[in-house]
Amino acid sequence: MLDLKGEAGTERITSLSDRGHGFAAHSTGAADAIGVVAPDTVSGSARWPVKSALFLLLAIVAGVGAWYAMHRPAPKIAAVSPDAVPLQLATVDLATVEPRVLTRMLPLSGSMAPVTQATVKAKVDGEILQLSVREGQDVREGDVIARIDTRHLQAQYDRELAAVDKARADLNLAMLNRDKNRALLEQKYISQNTFESTESAYAGSVASLKLAEAQARVAKVGLDDAVVRAPFSGTVATRLVQAGEKVSADTSIVTLVDLRQLLLEAAVPAAEIPAVGIGQQVRFKVGGFGQRQFEGEVQRISPMTVNGSRAITIYIAVPNADRALKGGMFAQGELVLNSSEPVLAVPVGAVKFESAVPIVYLLEGDTIARRQVTLGTQTEGSEFVEIRTGVQAGDRVIVPDIGERKPGSKASVRDSAKKTA
């Protein structure tokens, strides 16, 4: 509400009226005495609730619009299939299937055993008086391993020696009689029959001496066998008896092995035997020796397959001068197979596996094709692998991974030299 008083008030009303604010002066005289209220001021106060409702409505509309804009689903964008766009390949991404001479490696495994090993047995009956070796002890050829009680054997030997002496005395007497009778026969003092009897007695004495000497030698052999000696230089693997035990002939006493030369037995598939030959090299590792590699050489090949399998055993000679390897150790390695004829091969990276099945992708014209293949013997660290079936010489295989491309999709080869220029 606006109070207009005096001449100053009249002039302000006139000024506001001139500017179009809707104010008018009715009487300058009455205006001096009382306060006049502008009609527009009253009507403006009445319109405030309407404006508030209008502003509230606009706010609600704006909120609804914002909520709709935030929750409106994104427009769908059509997905582009990777097969719809041709695959770009460089010339280095392709490899030609062609014959190559590969040094193939045949994986093998087996256990090792000493080439020379023996179970030393007793040759006579008796009690073990001394056993001077234990497991792991080295012995030289001829060293004493055990001694057996020899008292009865010594007595037998002495008896045989006495029999030899008696037989030799009988022979001397027979020789003397023969010489005398020969002289008497020449003088015609005795008959020929008498001389022949003397000659026969002499021959019998000679035979008796030989028999006695043979029996003495047998007794001497038994006496010597009571001392058990090492048949070769090696290491005692097991000791089977103890001192004081009663043993008989053929009782095992110790097991002796020579670790300087070992033999590795490995089974090889029969299909690979034509490529295996005497003298081929074998490289292998043994658990516990880290990355140390041992070498051997194929020495023998079994003429028959192992019962119940299609594998053939090969025997590999392994030198072991430092005796680091022991009998019974398990070895895993590779046999170097020198391929005499070229075989079809592709880079190792071109072979993919789907559910453990080897496949390759080919580029036939401008189309990708998929082929299942059969691999040959693989060599660890080799850049190429043999392909026995599934591809032909001259086919172009794709080396890198082609992602989700499917057989039948298009591909093009760009010239790497042109792109570089």
Image: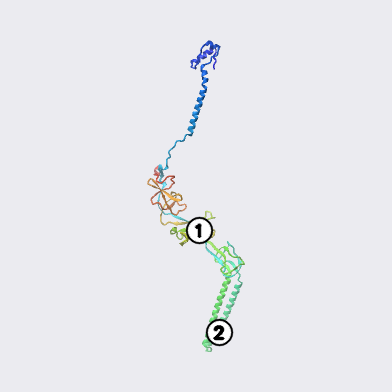
Q: Residues within 10 Å of mark 2 (few under 14, many from 20)?
A: some
Q: Nearer the viewer, residue 172 or 73?
A: 73
Mark 1 or 2: in front is: 1
Q: Nearer the viewer, residue 25 or 7?
A: 25
Residue at x 54%, y 81% (from the top left corner): 204
Please provide percent x and percent y for residue 145: 58, 66
Looking at the image, residue 192 lies above or below residue 399:
below
Query: Residue 417's mark?
Result: none
Q: Nearer the viewer, residue 261 or 127?
A: 127
Query: Residue 110's mark?
Result: 1
First in sequence, mark 1 or 2: give its number.
1
According to the picture, the residue beneath numbered tag 2 turns out to be 177
Q: Amino acid at mark 1?
A: Gly
Residue 156, by quadrant, is bottom right
Please provide percent x and percent y for residue 155: 60, 74
Q: Residues within 10 Å of mark 1 (few under 14, many from 20)?
A: some
For the residues labelled 1 and 2, say whether their Cβ atoms are less than 8 Å apart. Answer: no
Secondary structure of the residue carrying tag 2 is helix
Outermost residue on the top side: it is: 29
Residue at x 57%, y 73% (from the top left corner): 220
Q: CA distance from mark 1 to mark 2?
A: 76 Å
Residue 98 vs residue 198: left or right?
A: left
Please provide percent x and percent y for residue 410: 39, 44
Residue at x 55%, y 83% (from the top left corner): 174
Please provide percent x and percent y for residue 193: 52, 87
